[in-house]
């Protein structure tokens, strides 16, 4: 049996896994082999799992919630440690915006559907504002920093090398630090049939993820070069950004599921998803989870 692993540049653990032999080595212990399916938009991960295109994937915190809301039967398999400095909501130095409450009426650029939606929606919800009605949320692009500096938008969620470069250039400041709002974990999930019928495959894949993270932690300059080649930006900026990541894979716990449920409830209240989601349903019915 070939296990197809989804890979996109926004998930560095999976990106490095696809370049190394760890998935092949770990899956060999359970009699299987890996294949890698590359795509550009991590938001599609739930759809690709449901369609049988991939068997296993990883994203930020938002896509698995929206996948459940769309009726896709996914199972959480592992998460990264919190990533406190992975991203931030930036405004101009001279902006009148100083707190989340000041965002009412603002135009905010962000990667809609990614973990960035979770960040902005929860920050607004915490101060009694709504993602859907109190801001204009627009999809970010290569010109988002330029538009922020030109005063065409009010705020921009930056991450990785883009965040490092913007702060180094100056003229902007952090309005919301990710760690002050959400844990911002990288999240790994699979189809239910694989997780429940072949749990040993999931265990092998999680071992491979941990080895890929160990490699990235030990080789930050090489990892930065790979990121720059894949996503643009300067190698030095990527190295700074990647050194800030925890590079540690953890179990799915009740505390994590509670974080995801809080996000799901906010998304329903704001209309970002159409249907209520019970996050605990996305757990395999084999073995025991740690609390």
Image (cartoon, grey):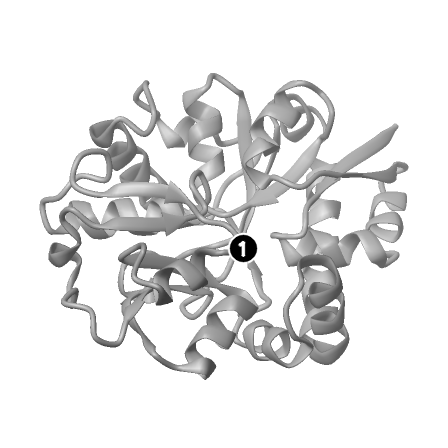
Left or right: 214 in relation to 277: right
> Viewed as shown, does residue 266 lie left or right of 117?
left
- x and y percent of residue 202 in the render? 69, 40
Residue sitting at x 11%, y 51%: 127
Q: Nearer the viewer, residue 101 or 127?
A: 101
Which is more toward the observer, 175 or 12? 175
Residue in the foreground of this view, choosing between 53 and 105:
105
218 displayed left or right of 262: right
Q: Residue at x 50, y 48 (%)?
A: 60
Residue linked to disc 1: 142
Taking 152 as reference, is 90 above or below it? below
**Considering only vertical position in the picture, is 21 above or below 135?**
below
Residue drawn at (65%, 21%) of the image: 193
Give the percent coordinates (x, y) of residue 114: 46, 44
Q: Is residue 211 visible?
A: no
Q: Which quadrant of the figure has residue 77?
A: top right
| Residue 285, x across and y down, in percent | 53, 27
* SS at mark 1 in the image: loop
Q: Residues within 10 Å of mark 1 (few under 14, many from 20)?
A: few
Q: Quadrant of residue 130?
A: top left
Image side of residue 142 versus residue 170, left or right: right
Q: Is residue 263 above or below residue 88?
A: above
């Amino acid at each position: 049996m070939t296990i197809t692993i989804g890979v996109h540049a926004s998930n560095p653990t999976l990106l490095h896994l696809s370049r190394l032999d760890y998935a092949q080595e770990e899956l060999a212990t359970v009699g299987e082999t890996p294949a890698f399916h590359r795509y550009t938009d991590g938001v599609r991960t739930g759809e690709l799992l449901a369609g049988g295109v991939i068997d296993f994937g990883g994203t930020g915190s938002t896509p698995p919630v929206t996948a459940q809301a769309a009726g896709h039967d996914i199972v959480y398999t592992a998460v990264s440690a919190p990533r406190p400095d992975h991203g931030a909501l930036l405004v101009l130095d001279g902006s009148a915006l100083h707190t989340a409450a000041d965002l009412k009426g603002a135009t905010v650029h962000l990667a809609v559907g990614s973990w960035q939606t979770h960040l902005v929606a929860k920050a607004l919800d915490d101060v009694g504002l709504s993602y859907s009605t109190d801001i204009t949320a627009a999809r970010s692009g290569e010109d988002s920093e330029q538009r922020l500096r030109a005063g065409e938008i009010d705020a921009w969620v930056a991450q990785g090398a883009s965040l490092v470069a913007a702060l180094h250039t100056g003229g902007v400041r952090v309005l919301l630090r990710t760690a002050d709002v959400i844990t911002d974990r990288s999240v790994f999930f699979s189809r239910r049939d694989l997780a429940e019928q072949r749990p040993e495959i999931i265990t092998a894949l999680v071992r491979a993820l941990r080895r890929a993270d160990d490699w990235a932690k030990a080789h930050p300059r090489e990892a930065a070069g790979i990121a720059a080649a894949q996503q643009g930006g300067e190698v030095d900026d990527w190295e700074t950004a990647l050194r800030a990541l925890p590079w540690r894979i953890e179990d799915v716990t009740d505390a994590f599921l509670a974080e995801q449920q809080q996000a799901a409830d906010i998304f329903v209240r704001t209309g970002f998803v159409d249907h209520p989601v019970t996050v605990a349903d996305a757990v395999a019915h084999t073995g025991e989870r740690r609390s």
